[in-house]
Amino acid sequence: MNVELNSNSNHITFSNDLQPLLEAVNISHNFDYPLFHDICLNIYKGDSVAIVGSSGCGKSTLLNILSTLLKPNGGEVKFQNKSIYSSKNEDILKIRREYFGIIFQTHYLFRGFNAKENLEISSILNNAKIDEDLLKLLHIDFVINQNVGTLSGGQQQRLSIARILTKKPKIIFADEPTGNLDKETANIVFDALFEYIKLSSGAMVLVTHEMDLAFKCGKVYRLENQRLVQIK
């Protein structure tokens, strides 16, 4: 397999991986008003994709649709060439549990446990080892035995991300993963996510308002006027 790394971005091209990991085909959705329509997007191994746009334009809704959390009103989403929302509920849950890693703005940590125990839960459920190098990369290795309630907000967010990456997802979906972090900590988080993609041949789709962080990704799309437009 030929691998090409663009030195000016965090995007890897796997030249013989022609089949997308994830494919959105003519996705449309609305609530009380039209949100977006005819959205098409392909995600390949090694891709890092940012979606930007004004508040309320539907970025998080689109991310939820791509990550199995919300069935679209129209169109379909395929994972490894299989339609997700045409599958049985248990098959959708299996995809979400085994192949997708979803990073929310809220941490969703187990408050009664310490940091290591939070990671061990993910490790046991997914039969995967805790990555000590990842903890160092996220700068949380020294707080691993502390109770979650004693950690700062930034440390809790990084622990939450470490827990997601422990399950070794094929695709990371991140909704404003650095929204509550200072710039230095945000860069630490992004470095860890990009490193994971490179080492695992995975992919990432994230929603963010921070344009400087978005443009660290290999591809950037803007959701505006109910359409998805590539700007990088």
Image: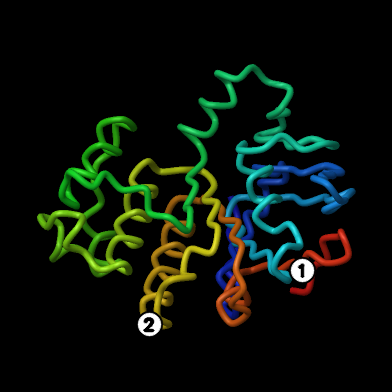
Please tell me whether mark 2 sits on a helix, a strand or a loop: helix
From mark 2 to mark 1, how far is it between C-alphas?
25 Å
Q: Quadrant of residue 181?
A: bottom left
- The amino acid beneath tag 1 is Arg
From this view, report whether residue 182 is shown above or below residue 121: below
Q: Is 58 rendered above or below residue 54?
A: above
Query: Whole-percent x and y of residue 229?
Result: 83, 66
> Of 39 and 71, which appears nearest the observer?
71
Residue nearest the observer in this picture, 135 or 54:
54
Q: Earlier in the sequence, mark 2 or mark 1?
A: 2
Q: Which residue is mark 2?
A: 184
Which residue does the image show at 36% across and 76% down from the upper left?
185
Give residue 55's mark.
none
Residue 110 in the image: x percent, y percent?
A: 26, 44
The residue at the point 78 percent across, 74 percent down is 231
- 227 vs 6, left or right, is right
Where, quadrant-wise, is the C terminus in this rendering?
A: bottom right
Which label sits on residue 222? 1
- Residue 20 or residue 59, whichever sits in front: 59
Question: Label 2 crowding class (10 Å Cα cut-off): few <14, some 14-19, many 20+?
Answer: few
Instruction: Residue 42: give x, y in percent of width and height.
Output: 74, 50
Residue type for callout 2: Glu
Residue drawn at point x = 60 percent, y = 20 percent:
89
Residue 11 is left or right of residue 119, and the answer is right
Whether residues under marks 2 and 1 lie with C-beta atoms below 8 angstroms apart, the answer is no
